[in-house]
Amino acid sequence: MSEREQGPSVLRLSESVTLEVEAVHFSKINVTRDVWSIDVPLEKITAHEAIDLLLYDQGEDELYHLRIPADDLHEGQDSPTVPASGDRVPLELAVDQIRLFQSVKPVDSGVASGRFLVGTCW
């Protein structure tokens, strides 16, 4: 199969930021819960050094890019929030400015993901 048939393996956000497509997850704000919700498959966590999150704030028309090291997500595997099947790590991140990017699952756990912010677009 040609590269064109396989599709791109990288996503270029800017001149200096290129992402591996298989390690990227996108979320827009869940307006009923006011969080970004993402389920990251464990197979992707074990296959990559880091997982890139693209979080879209449709109210501000802004896209945030977080790069979370796989080791940090591995630590979440033993969390009671992981489904019984154990095949995914669920993330719910706050959207309000006071707690921006803090984990709200389990309830207000306060784990700060803001330190992983790479940048914003738009």
Image (cartoon, rainbow, N blue to C red):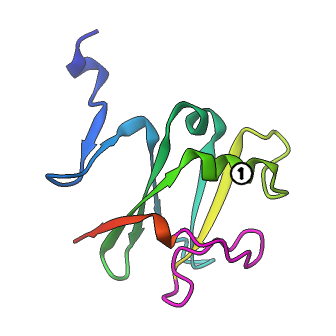
Q: Residue at x 39, y 67 (%)?
A: 56
Q: Residue at x 26, y 18 (%)?
A: 5
Q: Residue 112: where, in percent of width, then height? A: 59, 73
Above or below — where is 83 with respect to 54? above
Depth check, front residue: 90 or 34: 90
* Residue at point 30%, 20% (across, down): 6
Secondary element type, mark 1: helix
Query: x and y percent of residue 12 in the render?
Result: 22, 46
Is the residue 84 above or below the residue 3 in the image? below
Q: In this view, which residue lies farthest toward the top?
A: 1
Q: Which residue is mark 1?
A: 75
Residue appearing at x 81%, y 50% in the figure: 78
Would you say 16 lies left or right of 75 here? left
Q: Quadrant of the N terminus?
A: top left
Q: Is residue 50 above or below residue 33?
A: above
Nearest to the observer: residue 113 or residue 92: 113
Q: Amino acid at mark 1?
A: Glu
Residue farthest toward the bottom in the current orientation of the protein: 98
How packed mark 1 is, by other alpha carbons closer than 10 Å (few <14, some 14-19, many 20 or more), is few
**Which quarter of the rendering shows the C terminus?**
bottom left
Tell me where residue 42 sits by quadrant.
Answer: top right
Drawn side of residue 31 relative to residue 81, left or right: left
Taking the magenta stretch, the answer to whether it contains residue 107 is yes
Q: Give the magenta part as a residue range.
A: 96-113
In x, y percent, where is residue 89?
68, 49
Q: Is residue 57 magenta?
A: no
- The image shows residue 72 at horizontal and vertical percentages of 62, 53
